[in-house]
Amino acid sequence: MRETQSNNIPIVNTKKSRWRNFLLFLAILGPGIITANVDNDAGGIAVYSLAGAEMGYRLLWSLVPILVALIVIQEMVARMGAVTGKGLADLIRENYGVKATFYIMLFLVVTNLGNTMAEFSGIAASSEIFGVSRYISVPISAFLVWLLVIKGSYKSVEKIFLVACFFYIAYIISGFMAKPPWYEIAVNSIKPTFEMNSKYLYVLIGLVGTSIAPWMQFYLQASIVEKGITIKEYKHSRVDVIVGCFIMYVVAFFIIIACAATIHRAGVKVESVAEAARALQPLAGKYASWLFAFGLLNASIFAASILPLSTVYYVCEGMGWEKGIDKSFEEAPFFYILYTSFIVIGALIVLVPKFPLLTVMFLSQVLNGVLLPFILIYILLLINNKHIMGEYINSKMYNIFSWIVVFVMITFTIIMLVTTFV
Amino acid sequence: MVALFEYFSKFLQREIASSDRTQLGYVYDFLAELGTLPKIKKVIIVKGFLHKTYCTIDWNDIAHSDGNYEVKKQKDNLEFKNSYNNHNLISLRKTLLDHQIVDMSGRKVVRVNDIHLLNTQDELFIAHMDIGVKGLIRRLGWDRVFEWFLKMFVPRSLYLKKDEFISWKFVQPLAPLEEKGVIGLTVNSKEIANIPVGDLSEIFEELDVYERKNLFKLLPIDVQAKLLGESESEVQRSLVEVLKPEQIVEIMNLMPADDATDMLSQLPRYEVLKVLPLLESDRAKKLFMLLAHKSDSAGGLMTLEYFEIEDEQMVVEAIEKIKNTEIKEESPNYAYVIDSEKKLVGKVTFRDLISAKPVEKIKNIMSKNVISVRTDDNAEQVAYILDKYNLLAIPVVDDNKKMMGIITIDDVLNYVLEKKEL
């Protein structure tokens, strides 16, 4: 209401108007860009750092096919949200019934619980760089996240998180300052190489897994629906989605470069999170670890406030339970119980002494990978259903292309499972 | 003997044979005729796994004895097609099962987990929608195990006794009945107009954009007007889109001026230009003036409807004028007093008027020193003043103290609440 009206009024106060333009700019930051930024969470930073530190520039090329696959998948999901006005869980329920929905939701809950643990361990790791024990930082941030959402003030804080994401620029600057071999980077970022050793495969699969996750598809479609975007405004949304994917690409690209140019060049093995901070040394010198900790903390809390809430949202949507923070506990008991247990379990497990954190995080990645093909197949079936999508079903070429993407993703998952358990 | 009530989900698992004893396939859907108690008219049978084909069979062509169902026709006389249409009947599967409906007795949006069918003398009727957990567990196929478990260990469990049913007369479907995309006018559409506007607007918030528009079209025009006045701007914007200019005008004539302005400000500019000339010119002028104010200023919040009397009038004249003032919304129990130059000079409560002598001049009984705000004051200031002086309404004046309108406390409250959610 305010936006439409303020257009008609000449703005007199320039100081105010600049602020207003800035707010408007933030308001335009859409679902696609937010999804991409949540995607660069604790797990994301860890995997990109590892890829650069261990493999140097050798895996840069893989980001291009990942980018393409991400754009294709996200575009379909966004289109589905705009055409139907419904969330993904909703559509699966209406078209494939209770059983399919229930088991997908069960899987999604387990995987995202793993992802939430990863976020809390990100919080633990970054606070320990600042010298704050995890036994203090994790419970406090868990409580803050819980409160933020329950009190309904999340939306106003979201923009602060987003602004804090400009932290990634540090990697870009640091990457430049480390004076990396640009020619080698250019070649490596387009020319695919393939090595048949387990370490290479492992990191490659990690990259794919962290960039294209099941929860993103639900989250993106839900945000499109929540913004009330219809097919008329969809053109803008497509731009937003593509820009979001590119942001993810650029961030991943420069984290890898920064790590390769510093850690890999020095031949250091990354064994703790703190060592990954070395990538920021060309920029921040001795403050590198602080800068890194700040970025990791922001990314972790950002994702920790979105992941549990959104997961519980889809579950309630699919199962037909009352949901939403504007409901009271009596009205929406499942919603509150699920949400609270998500946060509590996620935070508590990180605090268990000697808990195999890395194993659990890795297992959650495996589950992500197992779940993804099913979600992708449902997405493709739904988007080609004329009763649902009308004239907005995929074109033939687009379909061939997206089935190839899905097929490659499934192959990757199978390879991952085989290499994990054989 | 057949059970009196049966669940739709139990039919869905049934195999069905033709009269020559060959298996045809499974029951897939029922089509029912709309009415106070919708009667099942046709049965859809599905066969095939990857390539599904459907056959439509009249209910009369089905023989049933002891719960066994059989098609009276020979297999060769049945035609299986790639899809089935509804024949102007309501499809239980496409419209009800797993879909969202409005529960008009509970006044909320719910999802249908199962459908309770009434079985009398070889005919089936839709009786209730099952929206409870029990229905979910039945659909998952765990009902027997679960009930056995509960009877063994928690015999007093509420689950065993409680069914969550909605009687058909309180059901308003939301999914389109036909491919044309229209929601059916069930016999119940009158019920929905009886839901208090506050509840109705909450229901509308939970619907997706398309359901919202479809359901809105079914409402009588006075309910549409009230609902639009009550809705948040985002909902309003999507609803106004479905109306033709003439309908908008008709609705706006039923609304108080400030609500009408809000609605107008949701329209694209070219729509506004279409609508304004259609309004009575007097009202159009006023609305145009209101539109020119920023929506978060006092001028944008104010309404033009209030009781205005003159200081030189006698009490009896003033009462007559108040009687003849047409006001479309609840207004505070006072009248504002203006002088010959239309400047605000005082206010009188209705109590003052009634208890004063009929021939007394207004200026002798009015209270002077009326607190007012100016058109360019912002909403926060207005809220602050209302709160500070414990007022229900406050007059708005321009730079020359000329009376422009009033702001009532609920308008400010709406604004503040809406802003909080941004």
Image (tube, coloured by chain):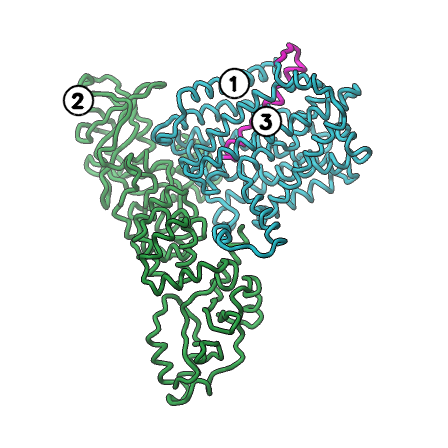
Chain colours: A cyan, B green
* Label 2: few (<14), some (14–19) or many (≥20) C-alpha neighbours in 10 Å: some
As drawn, is A393 to the left or to the right of B46? right
Please identify the quadrant where the N terminus of chain B is shown: top left
Q: Callout 1, which amino acid?
A: Ile
User: Spatial distance from mark 2 to mark 1, Cα to Cα?
Assistant: 45 Å
Residue at image point 50% right, 29% down = A74
- Taking depth in this image into account, of A143 and A351 the one nearest to the observer is A143
Q: Callout 2, which amino acid?
A: Lys
What range is drawn magenta here? A192-220
Q: Are marks 2 and 1 on the same chain?
A: no
Judged by depth in the image, the label closer to the viewer, 2 or 3, is: 3
- Taking depth in this image into account, of B81 and B399 the one nearest to the observer is B399
Judged by depth in the image, the label closer to the viewer, 1 or 3, is: 3
Report which residue position mark 3 lands on.
A211
Q: Which chain is indicated by disc 1?
A: A
* Residue A266 counted in the magenta span: no
Residue B160 drawn above or below residue B387: above
Residue B102, image x, y percentages: 36, 46
Q: Quick check: can you spot residue B203?
A: no
Quick one: which residue is furthest to the top in this view?
Answer: A196
Quick one: which residue is furthest to the right in this view?
Answer: A286
Report which residue position mark 1 lands on.
A410
